[in-house]
Image (tube, helix red, strand yellow):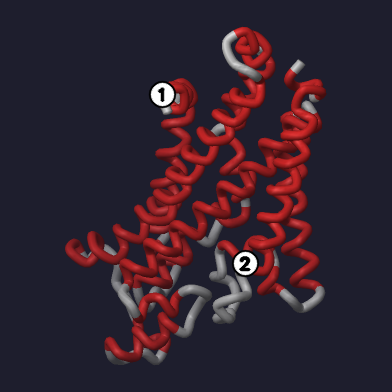
C-alpha cells in the first residue's frame, strides 16, 4: 500500500493537477458562458450538454494522458529497468496499473459528478440558468420528472433520486475511463510506442461510433454507451454490450502483457 501511495504522489505532478482541474471545471464554465445559445428545460439538459460534448468526443485521449505521460517518462528514463534490483518487474507494472486505475477513476468521476452537483444543488440557489420547460411542452414538475426519466440511458434512476442517478452515472463513466486508459497503457507496453498506444484506441473509438451509426445500431457505439446524450432512451442493457467487449479486450491484453512481460522491448 505504501508503494502505491508513493507512486500516486510522484505521478500527481503540477501538470497533471492542472490538467485534472481543467477537465473537471472547463466544460462547465464553457457551458455557462454560452447559456444564451440554448433553451434548457431542466438541469438534465444543461448537464448533458456539458459532459456530452468535447469530453465525449475525445474521451480515450483524455483518460490516456492522466497517467500514461508520467509512465512513459519512466520507461524512457529506464527507471523501470533500474528498479529490478529492488523488486521484480511484475510488481512494478502491477503498481503502475493500480495507480493508473486510481487516478483515472477519481478524475473522471469528478469530471462527471462536480457538474452534476453544481447544476442540481448549487445553481438553483443563485438562479444562474433560466430554464424554459414550457418550450418542450413541460408545464409541471411531474412533466419534467417523467421527461427526465424517459430521456436517456440510466435516467430511469432519477426516479429513485437525482443524486442516485448522478452518483451511479459518474461511477459508470469512471469505470469506462479506466478501461480505455488500460487499453492505451497495455498498447504502449506491447508496441513500445506511446504515439501508437494513444492514437490507436482513439481511432478505434471513433471508427466504432461511425460504423454503428452507419449500420443503424448507434446504441452499441463506444461513445453512446458512455455518453448516451445524442440518442433517445436506450434499454438498460444496451450500454453493457460495448462495455463487455471493451472489458474482454482489456482482460485479453492484460493476460498477454503478463505472459510476455519479461520479453517486452519497452521494459528492457
Residue at 53% over, 53% down: 175
Residue at 60% over, 25% down: 91
Above or below, 28 against 195 in this view is below
Quarter residue 133 falls in: bottom left
Residue at 44% over, 70% down: 38
How much space separates mark 1 and mark 2, taking CA atoms?
38 Å
Q: Is tag 1's residue or tag 2's residue first in the polypeptide sequence?
A: 1
Residue 36 visible in the picture: no
Name the foreground residue: 4 vs 218.
4
Above or below, 232 against 100 in this view is below
- Marker count (numbered): 2
Q: Which SS class for mark 2?
A: helix
Q: Which SS class for mark 1?
A: helix
Quarter residue 127 falls in: bottom left
Name the foreground residue: 157 vs 223.
157
Q: In the rendering, at what x and y percent does residue 131 appear?
A: 32, 75
Q: In the rendering, at what x and y percent does residue 242 appear?
A: 68, 64
The quadrant in which the C terminus is found is: top right
Q: Residue furthest left?
A: 125
Name the foreground residue: 74 vs 142.
74
Q: In the rendering, at what x and y percent does residue 117 appear?
A: 30, 59
**Which residue is label 2 attached to?**
224
Residue at 38% over, 88% down: 146
Residue 3 visible in the picture: yes
**Which residue is label 1 attached to?**
2
Amino acid at each position: 500500500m505504501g508503494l502505491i501511495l508513493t507512486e500516486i504522489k510522484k505521478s500527481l505532478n503540477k501538470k497533471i493537477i492542472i490538467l485534472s482541474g481543467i477537465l473537471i471545471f472547463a466544460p462547465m464554465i464553457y457551458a455557462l458562458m454560452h447559456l444564451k445559445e440554448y433553451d434548457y428545460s431542466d438541469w438534465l439538459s444543461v448537464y448533458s450538454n456539458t459532459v456530452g460534448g468535447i469530453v465525449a468526443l475525445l474521451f480515450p485521449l483524455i483518460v490516456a494522458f492522466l497517467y500514461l505521460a508520467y509512465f512513459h517518462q519512466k520507461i524512457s528514463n529506464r527507471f523501470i529497468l533500474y528498479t529490478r534490483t529492488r523488486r521484480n518487474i511484475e510488481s512494478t507494472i502491477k503498481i503502475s496499473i493500480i495507480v493508473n486505475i486510481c487516478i483515472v477513476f477519481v478524475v473522471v468521476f469528478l469530471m462527471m459528478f462536480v457538474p452534476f452537483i453544481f447544476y442540481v444543488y448549487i445553481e438553483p440557489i443563485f438562479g444562474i440558468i433560466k430554464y424554459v420547460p414550457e418550450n418542450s411542452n413541460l408545464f409541471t414538475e411531474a412533466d419534467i420528472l417523467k421527461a427526465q426519466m424517459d430521456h436517456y440511458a440510466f435516467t430511469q434512476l432519477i426516479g429513485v433520486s437525482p443524486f442516485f442517478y448522478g452518483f451511479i452515472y459518474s461511477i459508470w463513466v469512471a469505470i469506462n475511463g479506466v478501461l480505455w486508459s488500460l487499453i492505451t497503457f497495455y498498447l504502449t507496453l506491447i508496441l513500445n510506442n506511446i504515439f501508437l498506444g494513444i492514437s490507436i484506441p482513439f481511432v478505434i473509438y471513433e471508427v466504432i461510433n461511425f460504423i454503428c451509426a452507419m449500420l443503424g445500431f448507434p446504441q452499441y457505439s463506444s461513445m453512446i454507451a458512455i455518453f448516451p446524450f445524442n440518442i433517445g432512451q436506450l434499454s438498460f442493457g444496451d450500454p453493457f454490450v460495448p462495455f463487455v467487449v471493451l472489458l474482454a479486450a482489456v482482460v485479453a491484453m492484460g493476460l498477454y502483457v503478463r505472459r510476455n512481460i519479461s520479453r517486452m522491448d519497452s521494459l528492457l
